[in-house]
Image (cartoon, rainbow, N blue to C red):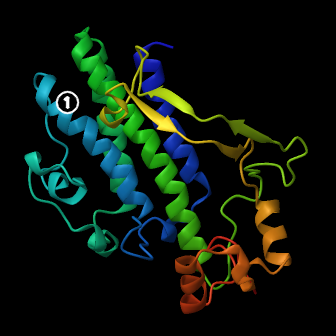
Amino acid sequence: MIINERYQSIRQQTIDFCSHLHPEDYAIQVVKFASPAKWHLAHTTWFFETFILKAELDGYVEYDSNFNFLFNSYYNNVGSRVLQSNRGNMSRPSTDTIFAYRDYVDKHMLDFFETNPKQKLLDLVDLGLNHEQQHQELLITDVKYMLGNNALFPVFNSDFNLIKDENTAADTVKISADVYKIGYQDRGFCYDNELGVHKVYVPDFEINNFLVTNGDYLSFMEAGGYSDFNLWLDEGWAWVNAEQIKAPPCIGIK
């Protein structure tokens, strides 16, 4: 897939994730470590505007000069920013404005691709797309946390099946003790913390070959897992009791 098609595909995925939200859902920030949906939409757009369009596209006109302050996350070299804990205080700009901002930047990004950018800039676009995919994951977890704290326990997407309820082919993989070479060794994209190939000693261990499903969580709950200290480390058990935890936050207990 060529870069402009990949760009459009990943950007559209973010919009698709939001298609089940109601207008009122976009601005809510339940806790300081989560961010509103519209902030994710704007921040991922801000990345491309700041590091690609403003820096590399001749004649580009910034959409709104205030957005650098509103939607910067932690990039100290490009200016000050709103505290993460205050992102939910921004009723303005409106969600409609954020969608218009995305459209504006996307249009100019397609213009940018027509300039035959050098590989170094295409690598920066690739970073931005991986960054957007990170925020797609954050967007979903933040929305789940938001809806899980709603007294009505609304469903994000009734047609969405994250994973089957049972692992019919569940098994355990045994890893033998050895000195292993770790670190990224391919030519594709990676983050900087994956670099630096080095050797490390790994002792024997076993790991499940499957993801935890909603069915597994329900089985754990039904078996009294949240009331059995034998299943928790001391810190976890203290947290369960202090917070009166009965279920994961995205599973409503009525």
Would you identify the image quadrant in which residue 251 lies? bottom right
Considering only vertical position in the picture, is 196 above or below 39?
Answer: above
* Residue at (55% x, 88% y) in the render: 243
- The answer to whether any part of residue 90 appears in the image is no
Would you identify the image quadrant in which residue 28 lies? bottom left
Q: Quadrant of the C terminus?
A: bottom right
Q: Which amino acid type is shown beneath numbered disc 1? A: Leu
Q: Pick whichever, 96 or 141, lies toward us.
A: 141
Left or right: residue 75 compared with residue 252: left
Considering only vertical position in the picture, is 80 above or below 131?
Answer: below
* Residue at (21% x, 59% y) in the render: 70
Q: Pick whichever, 57 or 172, lies toward us.
A: 172
Q: Residues within 10 Å of mark 1 (few under 14, many from 20)?
A: many
User: Residue lying furthest right in this view?
Assistant: 168
Residue 149 percent coordinates (x, y): 57, 79
Q: Pick whichever, 234 or 55, lies toward us.
A: 234
Element on which disc 1 rests: helix
* Residue at (41% x, 67% y) in the render: 34
Residue 169 percent coordinates (x, y): 88, 40
Instruction: Please name the residue that numbered disc 1 is placed on.
Output: 53
Residue 80 percent coordinates (x, y): 10, 58
Left or right: residue 52 compared with residue 224: left
- The answer to whether any part of residue 72 appears in the image is yes
